[in-house]
Image (cartoon, rainbow, N blue to C red):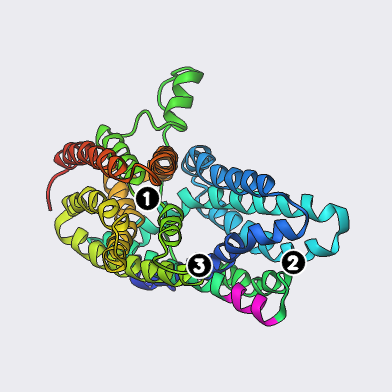
Amino acid sequence: MTSPHPGTWSPWRSVVVFGLVSLAADMAYEGMRAMAGPLLGSLGASALVVGVVTGTGEALALVLRLFTGSWADRGNRHWPLTIVGYGMTAVCVPLLALTPFLGAAGLGVAITLILLERTGKAVRSPAKSALLAQMAPEGGRGKGFGVHKALDQVGAFSGPLLLAAVAAATGLIWPGFALLAVPGAAAMVLLLWLRRHTTAGTDVDDVPAGPPRGRAADLRAAVLGSELPRAFHLFSLSSALTTAGLMTFGVISYRLVEDDLVSVAAVPLVYAVAMAVAAVAALANGAAFDRRGGRTLLVVPVLVTVVPWLVLGGSLAVVLAGIVVWGVAMGIQDSTVKAYVADLVPTRRRATAYGVFAAVQGLGALVGGTLAGALVTNHATALSVVLGVLQLAALGLLLRATAAVPAR
C-alpha cells in the first residue's frame, strides 16, 4: 500500500515496526504464560485452580474473537481495539509483580490480571491481523505475515528466557514480572508511533447495513460470518483439521521425557529450536505464497501427517527430525494461512473473518488435544492413523477452497 500522505511510512517499514510491536508484547505475555503456574502456586493455588485459570484464559483469547472481530469491522475500530488490547497486556503483566505483597487478596488479583490479559489478546488479534493485511505491500502479503511471525517468535522465546534468568539470579518470581514492564511499554510506544505514520485502517468503509434481516440473521452475519465467501469457510474447516492433527508441544515434550530421550531441563532448548525453525518457515513459505498463492499451503496437511510418525518414534534423531517438521508446520500455520484469509474475504470484513477463523481453529485444537491425550501413551500408532485421516479430509477441503480462487 502506498499513500500520498506526507510522513506515511513505506509498507515494509510499517510491517517491520508492527512486527517489533509484537516482539515486545510477546516478551511480556509469553513470559507471563511461562511463569503463571509457579506464580499462582506460590500464592496458594492448587494444581486444579492453575489448570482452570490457564485453560479459561486460553478459551477467552479464542472465543471472544468472534465478537471483537465483528466489532472492529462494523465501526472501523481496528486501531482503537488494537491499542486497547496491547495496552491491557502492557498493564496487566507487570502488575502481577505486586500480587505477592497483597496478602490473602493476592491470588484473586493475580487470577483477574491473567484473565484480563488474555481478554486483551482477544480484543486486539482480529483487528491487528486486518491492519497487517492492509499494511503489507501489494503482492507481498505472504512475506509480510512471515516477517511479522518471525519477529513475533523472537519475543515468544526471549520473554520466558528473561524470566527464567531473573528467577535464577534472585530466587524470586515477582522481579521478572516487574521487568516485563519495559517490553510492555516499548510495545505501546512503537504502536502509537506506527499509528501516526500509516494509513492502514483509515480507508476501510464500515460494513454496509443492507436491508433489514432480523436479529438472528444479523447475529449470524456479524459474529459467525455467515455472509463470508464459501471458500473462506472451507479453508477455515481445513485449517481446523490441520490444527487438530498438529500435536501440541506439551504432548510431544511429555513423550520426550517419559521415553527418557531428553531431560526435563533440555525440553526448553528443544522448544527453542522448534520456534527458530517456525520463524524461518514462516518467512520462506510467505515468500512462496506471494508467487504461487494458496496452493503453497497444500504442503501443510502432508507435514502434519508426518509429524506423529516421527515424534513418536523410538530414537532421538528421528524425534528431533519430527520436531523440525513440527516447527515448519507451525510456522506456516500461524502466518501464511492468515495471509490467505485476507485474500479470501472483502477488506471490510477481514477482522470478522479472523475472529471466526480463530474460533474454528480453537475447536480444532480442542479436538486434537483430546485425541492426543487419550491415545498418545498406549495407542501411538492408532493416533498417527487417525490424525492422518483428518489430514486427508483437510487436504480435500483445501483443494476445494483454493480452486475457488484464481491462481497467481
Residue drawn at x 37%, y 66% is 274
Residue 270 quadrant: bottom left
Give the Cα separation between the discs numbered 1 and 2: 33 Å
* Residue beneath disc 1: 247
Assess whether residue 168 is covered by the magenta stretch.
yes
Specify few, some or many for label 1: CA neighbours under 10 Å numbering under 14, 14-19, or 20 or more: many
Residue 14 visible in the shown view: no
Question: What residue occupies the far top of the structure in this picture?
Answer: 214
The magenta stretch is 162-169
Assess whether residue 86 is covered by the magenta stretch.
no
**Residues at circles 1 and 2 in contact by the CB criterion of under 8 Å:** no
What amino acid is found at the position of numbered circle 1 in the picture? Met
Residue drawn at x 56%, y 48% is 123
In the rendered image, residue 143, in percent from the top left (x then y), is placed at 28, 65
* Residue beneath disc 2: 97
Q: Which of marks 2 and 3 is in front?
A: 3
In the image, 108 versus 84, the foreground residue is 108
Split into 4 quadrants, where in the image is the N terminus? bottom left
Question: What residue occupies the far left of the structure in this picture?
Answer: 407
In the rendered image, residue 18, in percent from the top left (x then y), is placed at 45, 67
Specify few, some or many for label 2: CA neighbours under 10 Å numbering under 14, 14-19, or 20 or more: many
Q: Main secondary structure of the magenta part?
A: helix
Q: Which label was assigned to residue 384?
A: none
What amino acid is found at the position of numbered circle 2 in the picture? Ala
Q: Which label was assigned to residue 264?
A: 3
Mark 1 and mark 2 lie on one chain; the one further toward the N terminus is 2
Residue drawn at x 22%, y 61% is 139
What amino acid is found at the position of numbered circle 3 in the picture? Val
**Residues at circles 2 and 3 in contact by the CB criterion of under 8 Å:** no
